[in-house]
Amino acid sequence: MTEGADHLAEVSRHIAEAARAAGRDPAEITLVAVSKTHGADRVRELLEAGHRVFGENRVQEAQGKFPELKAAYPDLELHLIGPLQTNKARDAVTLFDVVQSVDRDKLAAALAKEMERLGRRPACYIQVNTGEEPQKAGILPKDLDAFVAACRTQYELPVVGLMCIPPVDEEPALHFALLAKMAARNGLAKLSMGMSADYETAVRLGATHVRVGSALFGARPPLATSSAVHA
């Protein structure tokens, strides 16, 4: 086995153990392997080990890495987990199968327009800024219900769940519980929460998708920026 396959097996085992401890079926949890700043060769290691769900923070980086991989592995599922600029909406709809970072009306409108134009409808998660941090993307909790309604009725987006990134200096379980409560209130079945340091906690609190980067791929190359908070 390759190093990547070893790490994949270890993370998958931890997810399964956390799920069973919470009385959940491990099959309910999807591991999103966050490959940002790592090359296509590292992604291919996990593909060859049977993994198919990956996440990227930036549209441009994904464009340079995934078209060839998706051609070779047609069942590869690619999630956008980083902030999305409206002028990249068309590229995102073209390449990604899931957009986890819908967080404002202008972006929702841009995505709806491009989905109509391209005839392609990636599943959407609404990113919630559960810690109400001014430097972080995401809709504020107090605005969530109205935004979910707008995405469904006004923009007709295929909204399937919520996503959050807790503050680094706070107990993540509180934020995961809040996200789960907001999702249930809005009839949303999917929860993308938990990263390398806290994905087991997220699984215990209902995560359906966990975004794991460094625990799978190791330390990121030096060119990684502050956007690393997304995985």
Image (cartoon, helix red, strand yellow):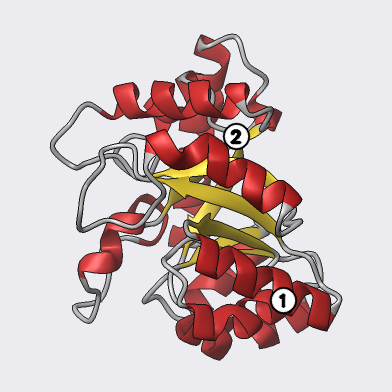
Q: Is residue 224 visible?
A: yes
On the picture, is 69 further left or further right than 88?
Answer: right
Label placed on residue 208:
2
Q: What quarter of the picture does the C terminus occupy?
A: bottom left
Q: Name the front one of labels 2 and 1.
A: 1
Q: What quarter of the picture does the N terminus occupy?
A: bottom right
Residue shown at the point (53%, 61%) measured from the top left: 105
Between 194 and 218, the one nearer to me in the picture: 194
Q: Residues within 10 Å of mark 2 (few under 14, many from 20)?
A: many
Query: Which residue type carries mark 1?
Result: Lys
Residue shown at the point (65%, 83%) measured from the top left: 90
Between 157 and 16, the one nearer to me in the picture: 157
Q: Residue 143: x and y, percent? A: 44, 40
Q: Residue 45: x and y, percent? A: 56, 68
Q: Residue 103: x and y, percent? A: 47, 56
Q: Residues within 10 Å of mark 1 (few under 14, many from 20)?
A: some
Tag 2 and tag 1, C-beta contact below 8 Å: no
Query: Where 101 falls versus 16 (above or below)?
Result: below
On the picture, is 187 further left or further right than 85?
Answer: right
Query: Where 134 falls versus 225 (above or below)?
Result: above
Q: Residue 163: x and y, percent? A: 49, 44
Query: Would you identify the image quadrant in which residue 91 lies?
Result: bottom right
Between 181 and 155, the one nearer to me in the picture: 155
Q: Which residue is mark 1?
A: 113
